[in-house]
Image: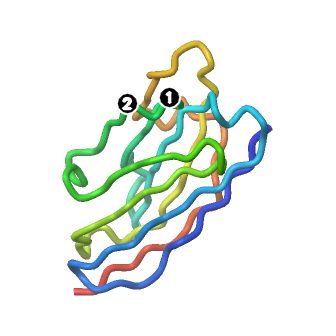
Amino acid sequence: QVQLIESGGGLVQAGGSLRLSCAASGRTFSTYTMGWFRQAPGNEREFVGTISWGGRTTNYADSVKGRFTISRDNAKITVYLQMNSLKPEDTAVYYCAAKSAPWNSRYISSWESDYDYWGQGTQVTVSS
């Protein structure tokens, strides 16, 4: 069982930056692929980015490439989402998710249905 708690959301002006954190419980976090997703009002939840448990493989949605960066610290059992050059269209509730993948240190996934555990979400609001 893994519990995920996101933090770091808030209100920021367009062009600004935020760093989201996702703290996990559980001794096997180091073999979990992690993902970030977001959901804006009236929209379906969408993929933002993912990182393998080895930390060397990442993938991002086209809409955030070059602006967002995912990283993880397995010792701190935390994954981060650094968001730069924020735009009003980035406004959403951001969720982190975890998928057990001990067989492949480079496994990543952009599919919501792949993930086993989800956090409660943190609100990010970007004003114009």
Q: Vertical placement of 67 versus 71: above or below? A: below
* Quadrant the N terminus occupies: top right
Q: What residue lies at 44% left-to-right and 48% top-to-bottom?
A: 71
Provide the secondary structure element on which disc 2 rests: loop
Report whether 42 appears left or right of 24.
left
In the rendered image, the quadrant that contains the C terminus is bottom left
Residue 54 visible in the picture: yes
Q: Residue furthest front?
A: 75
Q: Residues within 10 Å of mark 2 (few under 14, many from 20)?
A: some
Q: Position of residue 102 (x, y in %)?
A: 62, 19
Q: Amino acid at mark 1?
A: Gly
- Secondary structure, mark 1, is loop
Q: Position of residue 112 (x, y in %)?
A: 49, 38
Name the side, left or right, on which 6 lies relative to 89.
Answer: right
Q: Identify which residue, 119 or 7, lies in the foreground.
A: 7
Q: Which residue is depicted at the point 58% across and 63% down? A: 121
> Residue at coordinates 22% horizontally, 49% vertically from top-left?
65
Mark-to-mark CA distance, 2 and 1? 7 Å
Provide residue 13's location: percent of width, then percent of height.
28, 86
The residue that disc 1 covers is: 54
101 or 120, which lies in front?
101
Q: For the image shown, how many numbered marks are present on the structure?
A: 2
Asked whether residue 41 is in view, the answer is no
Which residue does the numbered mark 2 point to in the structure image? Answer: 57
> Crowding at label 1, few (<14), some or many (≥20) Cα neighbours within 10 Å?
some
- Image position of 5 (left or right of 65): right
Residue 101, quarter of the rendered image: top right
Q: Which amino acid does the dot numbered 2 rest on?
A: Thr
Residue 2 at x, y percent in the picture: 75, 42
